[in-house]
Image: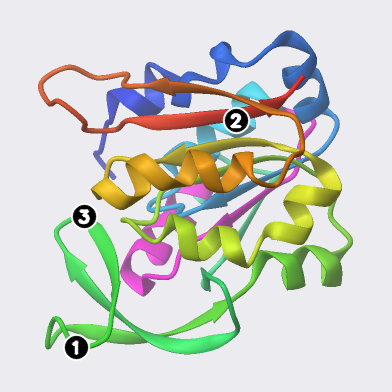
Amino acid sequence: INHFEASVFFYKHNIDCFQKNTLSKIHQKSIIDVGGYIGDSAIVFEKEFPYSNIYCFEASQNNYNLLLKTLKLNNSQKITAINKGLGSENKTIKLSFAGSCSTLCSEISDQYENIEIITLDDYVKTNNIEVGLIKVDIEGFEQDFLKGALETIKKHKLALILSIYHNIDDFFNIKPFIEQLNLGYTFKIIKPVDGSISLETILLCEVN
């Protein structure tokens, strides 16, 4: 596996921009990696938060297979890989592929897989997980994910790393969606890499 993204391995999803008390809370709880791809982010989180259990969700079978190889190559002990997608409800959808990315769709490609989608709320409740951080990068379906994670967010008031660059709707509406929960969140919008106006732009959310 030969893949390097500066936003992951160098900037580490800008976790250093969180307040110290937020980072301390994450160390004591679990991390949810939504859109785990080949496991690059999960490996970084494992090294930065060695006491946290990490649950890495990747819906694409091909990416999931590479994810398992990544975990084996790095002798990972704290990462659980889950070959499912996360959304607003439990259902089966079609997943289409475009390069290294995966896109949830209805009929936009002849190359697709049938993918099981579950809600994070159901998974967290069933497995009794204390969540400290959620990172989400699922190609523009972040808002759909958030609708299925509301109870988890409200209960744990966890830190969030949300990709908001995939479409205009995400860029302008994800922050107000979190704000209207009235949980005391503060926000930082960060673009860690140059070369594009919006590429890799993330929204960091934390409750001080």
**Residue 71 image label:** none
Residue 145 rendering spot, x and y as whole percentages = 53, 62
**Which residue range is magenta in the image?**
50-71
Q: The disc labelled 1 sits on which kind of residue? A: Glu
Q: CA distance from mark 1 to mark 2?
A: 34 Å
Q: Residue furthest right?
A: 128
Left or right, 50 with reference to 174: right
For the residue pair 5 and 169, the one nearer the viewer reads as: 169
**Element on which disc 3 rests:** loop
Q: Is residue 141 above or below residue 44?
A: below
In the image, residue 189 lies in the stretch drawn in magenta = no
Q: Residue at x 31, y 56 (%)?
A: 139
Q: The disc labelled 2 sits on which kind of residue? A: Cys
Q: Earlier in the sequence, mark 2 or mark 3?
A: 3
Q: The disc labelled 3 sits on which kind of residue? A: Ser
CA neighbours of label 1 inside 10 A, class few (<14), some (14 to 19), many (20+)? few
**Residue 107 image label:** 1
In the image, residue 55 lies in the stretch drawn in magenta = yes
Residue 161 rendering spot, x and y as whole percentages = 53, 35
Instruction: Tell us which disc is closer to us: 1 or 2.
Output: 2
Instruction: Tell us which disc is closer to us: 3 or 1.
Output: 1
**Residue 205 image label:** 2
Residue at mark 3:
100
Q: Residue at x 82, y 37 (%)?
A: 29
Residue 86 rendering spot, x and y as whole percentages = 54, 68
